[in-house]
Amino acid sequence: MKWINLKKAFFVKIALIFIFLAIFLSLQPNLTLSSATYTLIPGGETIGIRLDTGVYVAGKYQVETESGKQTPWKNCNIEAGDRILSFNGKPVRSNQDLVNYLKNYDETSAELTLERNGVVHTTKILVCTTTGQEKSIGLYIKDRILGIGTLTFIDPATKKFGALGHGVFDATISLGKVTGTVLSSTVESVKRAIPGTPGEKRAVLNKEEWGKFSLNSVTGLYGIMRQPSFLNKKPVEVATQSEVHQGKAYLMTVIEGGRVEKFSLEIISVKMQEEADVKGIKVKITDEKLIEATGGIVQGMSGSPIIQDGKIIGAISHVTVDNPLIGYAIHIEWMLKELTEIDNI
């Protein structure tokens, strides 16, 4: 999944970071993966992802004041990754809340209520006035993660979906249970991959909402799709691990605009697994059009469904940086097993 970096300076020098291009279904009662009647609508569409994290500390900086550089957090119990719950007892639900509280704040210190690893604590922090006469506490904060990825499948009966083929993580914070929105997205260009340098889809996130997700696990993002046009595609059967074999297959993804295309690949090896892992199938891109356009597997392609013998077998999850023609996919089985955890949203 691809995530994009964006720094935005408000009164507290807020940094909203659009994370790396990393780049959803309910199990029927008593469903077994050997059931030949269980079908999914394959995806391939590029989707925008807005993951709501709550406000947390992404970093610290020194504040430029008329008396020199100040470190308002120096003697505070504040670490990167701490969630900010309140400012002087007032709830902080977004970056803008904190900006608004500071805008007309006249005191020289304030009390922050923070949560770290499930434990809530309070600490005092100085409030400085910058050379531009703005209030600052010297913290970079984030309240969401934005990026793009690829839709893997939709259950035509429940409209639940799975995407990405791996989870969304942030090195600063433990995300825990999160919710978010699936947005319309359009691929404008592709940076080609070369050995040693990953490529990436370059896409825009549109305002149109396609769905909601309520589960972020190691195997992907899961939720409910509300875009009716996706339900018009023909469902395909689900393959068990034992049905996946070496040989020809194809993936479905977008490399321009919003059009899903099929691109050939070869299954190099298959690993039979008893526990969920995102690297169960090793693949090699063989499609000349895709190689010419992208150089192989690129960031933002994660979640692209793979079809073999008319069945969905898995989704692209990783690329080998030294050889972008080679990558890995997750068995579809592991994505299916997450579906009972999805909230009805």
Image: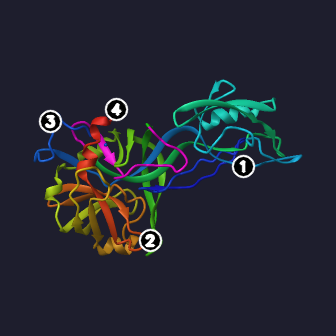
Instruction: Look at the numbered discs 1 and 2 and tell me whether their residues touch, using CB distance below 8 Å.
Output: no
Q: Is residue 338 above or below residue 199?
A: above
Which numbered disc flags the more N-terminal residue, 3 or 2? 3
Label 4, residues with CA under 10 Å away: few <14, some 14-19, many ≥20: some
Residue that mark 3 sits on: 30
Which numbered disc flags the more N-terminal residue, 1 or 3? 3
Q: CA distance from mark 3 to mark 2?
A: 44 Å
Residue that mark 2 sits on: 192
User: Residue 174 in magenta?
Assistant: yes
Q: Is residue 47 above or below residue 320?
A: above
Q: Give left or right: position of 134 versus 289.
A: right
Which disc number belongs to residue 61? 1
Q: What kind of residue is marked 3?
A: Asn
Residue 287 coordinates in the image, percent (x, y)? 28, 72
Q: CA distance from mark 1 to mark 2?
A: 35 Å
Residue 296 coordinates in the image, percent (x, y)? 36, 70
| Span of residues in magenta | 155-176
Residue that mark 4 sits on: 343
Q: Quadrant of the C terminus?
A: top left
Q: What kind of residue is marked 1?
A: Tyr
